[in-house]
Image (cartoon, helix red, strand yellow):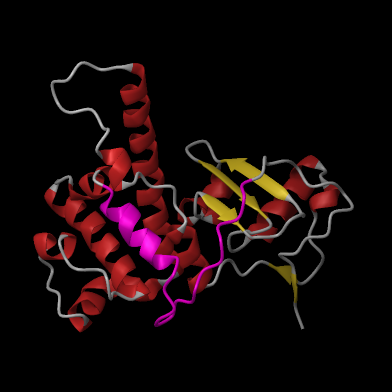
């Protein structure tokens, strides 16, 4: 749909969640990807609600004049990456090896990794779009004494890394694969490297990061009732 393309849904995260016990959930398929959320919304979400109200008569969704959605902050974006459900190193040891006969559980593992890789790579791009500072990931790496050397980045000691270094390293690996048509990104997912790095994000309290709370429970998406309060609304002055 042209409207959704102009709205910039490609730059949305796959999932938006806020640790609120009640509220509203939503889900959107734009013809290419699915997006969903619980009490959290991408930037410009009010434009989508206005479109639905105008085109389909969903008046209960119409935002009030002056209401806007600013999208997640950098810290909230970091939290969305931190709680990604990536395969751990223990799970990676159970992955099927090349040449081994396939079984149902291993085929499921392959499918899961493929889907996680696609969504995680998309959300890394969404993170950079929402936080343009990270487009200069090479500068962030240089501040920590790292060059654009893929082996150095992949094998670095993350025990004392801050949030910016963790995310800049993931971005660098993703970009390197695109330039050189390599497979370091999927390798870091399959061997549990990214799971270890994102786990570290959950407890960081350095730089722009803070100690993240426990991940919110996912809820089944549904359309909001007419009487539902919309916590995303920010009333313009």
Camera-side residue of 34 and 190: 190
Range of magenta residues: 192-218
x, y percentage for residue 34? 53, 40
69 displayed left or right of 157: right
131 displayed left or right of 2: left
Looking at the magenta stretch, what is its main secondary structure? loop
x, y percentage for residue 197? 32, 61
70 vs 214: above or below: below
x, y percentage for residue 148? 13, 68
36 vs 173: above or below: above
Residue at the spot 12% in from the left edge and 73% down from the top edge: 147
Q: Which image quarter: residue 231? A: bottom right
Q: Which image quarter: residue 213? A: bottom right
Q: Is residue 217 magenta?
A: yes
Camera-side residue of 108 and 148: 108
Residue at the spot 30% in from the left edge and 17% down from the top edge: 103
Camera-side residue of 32 and 168: 168
124 displayed left or right of 222: left
Given the current orientation, which residue lies at the most extreme right position?
A: 227
Q: In the rendered image, which quarter contains the N terminus?
A: top right
Q: Is residue 57 magenta?
A: no
Residue at the spot 50% in from the left edge and 49% down from the top edge: 14
Q: In the rendered image, which quarter contains the C terminus?
A: bottom right
């Amino acid at each position: 749909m042209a409207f959704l393309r102009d709205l910039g849904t490609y730059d949305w995260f796959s999932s938006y969640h806020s640790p609120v016990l009640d509220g509203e959930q939503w889900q959107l398929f734009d013809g290419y990807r699915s997006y969903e959320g619980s009490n959290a919304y991408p930037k410009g979400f009010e434009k989508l609600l206005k479109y639905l109200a105008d085109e389909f008569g969903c008046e209960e969704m119409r935002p009030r004049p002056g209401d806007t959605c600013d999208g997640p902050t950098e810290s909230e974006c970091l939290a969305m990456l931190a709680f990604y459900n990536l395969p751990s190193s223990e799970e990676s040891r159970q992955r099927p090896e090349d040449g081994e006969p396939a079984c149902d559980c291993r085929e499921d593992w392959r499918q899961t990794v493929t889907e996680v890789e696609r969504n995680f790579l998309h959300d890394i791009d969404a993170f950079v779009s929402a936080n343009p500072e990270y487009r200069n990931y090479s500068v962030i790496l240089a501040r920590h004494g790292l060059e654009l050397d893929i082996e150095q980045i992949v094998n670095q000691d993350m025990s004392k890394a801050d949030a910016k270094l963790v995310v800049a390293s993931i971005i660098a690996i993703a970009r390197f694969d695109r330039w050189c048509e390599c497979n370091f990104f999927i390798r870091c997912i399959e061997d549990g490297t990214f799971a270890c790095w994102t786990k570290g994000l959950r407890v960081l309290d350095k730089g722009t990061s803070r100690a993240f709370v426990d991940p919110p429970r996912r809820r089944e998406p549904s359309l909001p009732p007419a009487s539902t309060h919309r916590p995303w609304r920010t009333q313009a002055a």
